[in-house]
Image (cartoon, rainbow, N blue to C red):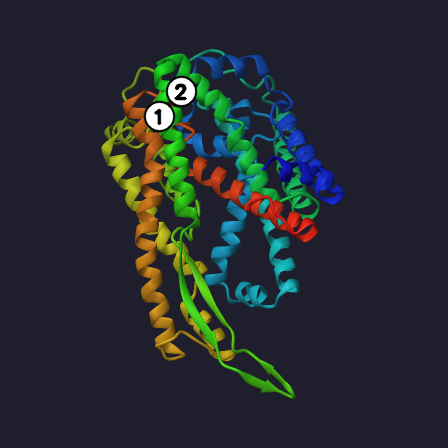
Amino acid sequence: MFSAVVRIFRTPDLRRKIAFTLGVIAIYRLGCVIPTPFVDFANVQTCLASSQDTAGLYQLVNLFSGGALLKLSIFALGIMPYITASIIVQLLRVVIPHFETLYKEGQAGQSTLTQYTRYLTIALGILQSTTLITVARSGALFGNSGSEACSSLITDNSWYAITLMVMAMTAGTGLIMWMGELVTERGIGNGMSIIIFTSIAAQFPSSLGAIGQSQGPEVLILVLAIGLVITTAVVFVEQSQRRIPVQYAKRMVGRRTYGGNNTYIPIKVNMAGVIPIIFASSLLYLPALIAQFNQPPAGKAPAPWVTWINDTLTKGDHPLYMLLYFLLIIGFTYFYVAITFNPEEVADNMKKYGGFIPGIRAGRPTAEYLDYVLTRVTLPGSIYLGLISLIPLIAFVLIGANQNFPFGGASILIVVGVGLETVKQIDSQLQQRHYEGLLK
């Protein structure tokens, strides 16, 4: 293992790629602590230190921004607008035939879709930064704490200052997107995934420190042990797949013989990744957001439906919230898998190139068989996603840890998934040069 690490740094090309990636990560983390113009950073720090509920409404965005959201920094929006834009463009392939045509055109069509994603990212950055600044001006960013410091986070409320803040946050989103694409081209791994990995990993020390400070070292050791078990289980499931054997018939093209080889179609247990968790969190966020903008004036009691939402669908410690969260994740898992994996398209491509599944006729029977297998493999995958996503909520109820509990939900899935993919890329780079990889 140590000799493989030494080989990494002795390979000039690989060493430059890793150094470039680490440099981009350092710039990104620096931008996460630089405040946006006209933001009172002292008041922001005071609210962060005194707030018990780390803005549960904005938990997911704050997680993906590495804590920059609640600091109102120039990178406050993080990579979330790009993730949202990518998901929207992918879903539009089902609705708009032109998008599906571009997807099938190869490199040229993919470049056009990427450009659409960039434009949509900037538009979402403007929208989300405007919303964030509006919430910060109203004093509700930290859950209506009533503190004077939390009500005066912005020092200048003029149109010029607000416009400059929106421009700064949107430009920060564009810069993050550009840096992610640079890492993909010149560094190691997928740039966007690396930035998300960095944002989540940066929260681990503070989350573990808060647990140790509030619950004691015994609970911290127990959490670390549970985290090790969860990580091992996640690695096992993320690597699990159902391999459907495929054989290709021999065919003559001129004097050459093509085909005749055996391969397989890998169907992962978790084909949807963290997308269902993001969808479910976003959907459950809407009732709380509506209730937040319908708070009564001081001295008046809120409406019964507002009180019910605040008590049930805000913090995540209510059984109804957990049940809805779990069921939504299962539903969105099937929905996303149905969009991203088309059995009929796979069956048509196999038939076109002379491939078939042993014992299954080509064409429609193959598509039905693939759909049969996919449906049954997705069920344990969706239940696994639901259980993993409930771990932070259960920890919040049992040990009083905040909802940024590191070993569960989207955080552990992204950290493990990106870590495995990056290690595989380093391993393949080493095998190209030394015939021995990082993993033996």
| Residue at 57% across, 30% down | 76
Determine if residue 266 is in view. Answer: yes
Distance from disc 2 to disc 1, alpha carbons, whole Å, reads 10 Å
Q: Position of residue 14 (x, y in %)?
A: 70, 43
Q: Identify the mark nearer the N-term, 2 or 1.
A: 2
Please, which residue is most extreme toward the right here? 12
| Residue nearest the observer in this picture, 163 or 39 | 39
Name the secondary structure under disc 2.
loop
Q: Is 352 located above or below residue 294 in the figure?
A: below
| Residue nearest the observer in this picture, 62 or 131 | 62
Q: Is 114 located above or below residue 147 in the figure?
A: below
Of circles 2 and 1, the one toward us is 2
Q: Amino acid at mark 1?
A: Gln
| Residue nearest the observer in this picture, 75 or 427 | 427
| Residue nearest the observer in this picture, 20 or 131 | 20
The circle on residue 96 is: none
Is residue 319 rendered to the left or right of residue 261?
A: left
Q: Position of residue 7 (x, y in %)?
A: 68, 40
Determine if residue 77 is in view. Answer: no
Residue to which mark 1 is pinned: 295
Q: Is 368 located above or below residue 329 in the figure?
A: below
Q: Position of residue 194 (x, y in %)?
A: 58, 39
| Residue at 64% across, 37% down | 3
**Residue 244 in which image quadrant:** bottom left
Residue to which mark 2 is pinned: 144
Q: Specify the quadrant that holds the N terminus.
A: top right
